[in-house]
Image: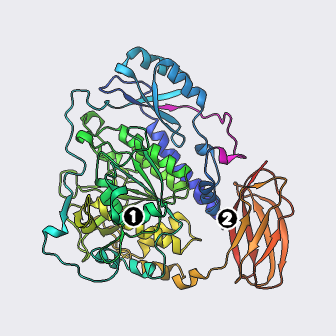
Amino acid sequence: MVISFFLFIHKRFFKVCLGFFIILGYSNQLSAQSGEWYWISFRSKPAGSYSFNQPQAFLSARSIARRVRQGIPLDSSDIPVYQPYVDSLQVAGAIVKHRSRWLNGVTVRIPNNDSIVRQRIMNFPFVRQGIPNGRVSGTGRFKPIQSKFQDERIVPVSSTEILPRTTSVYGFSGGQLRLHKGDYLHDRNFRGQGMRIAVFDAGFVNMPDMPVFDSLYLRNRIVDTYDFVDMDTGVYEFDSHGTYVMGCLGANVPGELMGTAPEAQYMLYRSENNVGASENPIEEDNWVAAAERADSAGADVFNSSLIYTTFDNPAFNHAWSDMDGNTARMTIASDWAAAKGILVVNSAGNYGGGPWYKIGAAADGDSVLAVGAVDTLGQRAGFSSMGPTADGRIKPNVMSVGAGAASCQIPGPGVAWISGTSFSGPIMAGLATCLWQALPGHRNMEIFDLLQRCANRQANPDTFNGYGIPNLQLAMSLAGLTPNRMNDLPQVRIFPQPASLSGPCSLEWGTGIPAGDYRVTWYNMAGQVMMTQEYTRFYDERNLMSLKNKPGAGLYLIGIEGLSFQARIPCLIVP
């Protein structure tokens, strides 16, 4: 199983690399098109001071554990960009905003679009290419396009005659959970506990002051915030779109409104600059930077309600041929995130009734779960973007409630009916998180596959509805496990973590693991066997097993293999 999954990862690595090199195929010339922002990519990536034996220098323990748990080896894409390259660009006159280890490049500002600075940059032998990325806000001759969220509808419940259909704990949000049998997981206490969701949006106005989110803040479930537009930690201004999204995910007012993952942890990232309705390619770079931070900090699931097709400057617009899963930087980064074991959920877009009626970036990614919109009766919304991708793949992947979904009123209290795939995406992302919580032994793409297989059109998917509306109770059945059984699943834990090379290290075996003979095997990140240790378990009870030898400093996967119990757990050994 370990070897077969490494083959999967190598195929994924080839795919994302293919997309990366397609981007790099542009002319090696720093064009002087309108704007001061540029994407600069590098030809190589020396390791510098970083080492795979010390991954904690560039990844959190939680991020490392996700990789090891899913059998994903570290590779050069995990190493930060080479600092001397960045230093050289700064000396040449560029102002560096973002660095991307996955795409091996940086986003820079060239003050006044100085042609001398541009030429200096392109004269560096380590620079592969430079692509213009848009103007600094408030400059240039192009008129902003309409607001990204202009076509989405928000109607306070108090101004309608619609009454709650139920007096249950879900209140107004009952329809959007029950359509997917999400209550089946919630009733069994799978509400996102221990899972971490990164949310990318345009702002989260008023969230800390709204009672609907009290439980998130009182229980420290907002674990990270950052504004990748203005480069600070303040995300609670500029735009309320992210607040409505969080109303679908993390709201918790029993009897009135309940999000699909009310007890998960959240990372709130502002990557979209919707001020003045501007739209520039640098916003995709903001998203990439946010995604890499979320990966490093240990996110399990991404929710993105952002789609990119057109920009203020028409010269930057994506062509339909770009929607092939290999071209837009945001799409390529989404596939990289999936290759790191993250489940990436992206709204399909609201273009279904317009001239561009199909999906946009990054919904075109083959490892991105693109979510279209239906109402609570399961009828497709006319505004929901369609597929297929430019290379003929089925999109959207699945459907969720995005027409008349329930979210919070801002500043509150109260409930609002909202419409847009911006909201079907987070509803599905929260449910997928709860499903993964219930199936902790599954990998991200196995959850992706389950969501498609448990949907009502899985036997006959199309480009309007994809595989249809997922049924999470059926997903559990397809996985061969029930939530009640998962609550009692025995576990083996390792401590301390990280362990020192010279200090003690033990496995704690929980109750429920059968007595018998076991082999404990250390695997490196390439899947190679480093050493083994035999162990006989005499009784079915909690006990400790000392790991007598360690293979050296580094990141490992410890495999526990017996006749009727198997497990794999990550282990980090430091000098």
Residue 262: x percent and y percent?
A: 42, 69
Query: Residue 197: which disc?
Result: none
Residue 126 visible? The answer is: no
Three-letter amino acid code of the residue under disc 1: Asp
What secondary structure is found at the residue carrying circle 1? helix
Q: Would you call the spot at circle 2 few (<14 residues within 10 Å), some (14-19), or many (20 or more)?
A: some
In the displayed structure, 286 sits above or below 540; it is: above
- Residue drawn at x 49%, y 18% as measured from the top left: 92
Instruction: Give the image quarter of residue 232.
Output: top left
Give 330 or 415, whichever is nearer the viewer. 415
Of labels 1 and 2, the one closer to you: 1
What secondary structure is found at the residue carrying circle 2? helix
Residue 104 part of the magenta-drawn span: no
Magenta residues: mostly which secondary structure? loop
Q: Which residues are magenta?
A: 40-57
Q: Gap between marks 1 and 2, in whole Å?
A: 42 Å
Three-letter amino acid code of the residue under disc 2: Val
Locate the N terminus by quadrant: bottom right
Residue 14: x percent and y percent?
A: 55, 49
In the shown orientation, is residue 402 left or right of residue 234?
left
Instruction: Give the image quarter of residue 566.
Output: bottom right
Residue where numbered disc 1 is placed = 214
In the displayed structure, 75 sits above or below 427; it is: above
Give 373 or 251, whichever is nearer the viewer. 251
- Residue drawn at x 76%, y 85% as measured from the top left: 540
Residue 42 part of the magenta-drawn span: yes
Give 454 or 155, whichever is nearer the viewer. 155
How is the structure coloured here?
rainbow
Q: Earlier in the sequence, mark 1 or mark 2?
A: 2
Residue where numbered disc 2 is placed = 2
Instruction: Give the image quarter of residue 405.
Output: bottom left
In the shown orientation, is residue 174 left or right of residue 14?
left
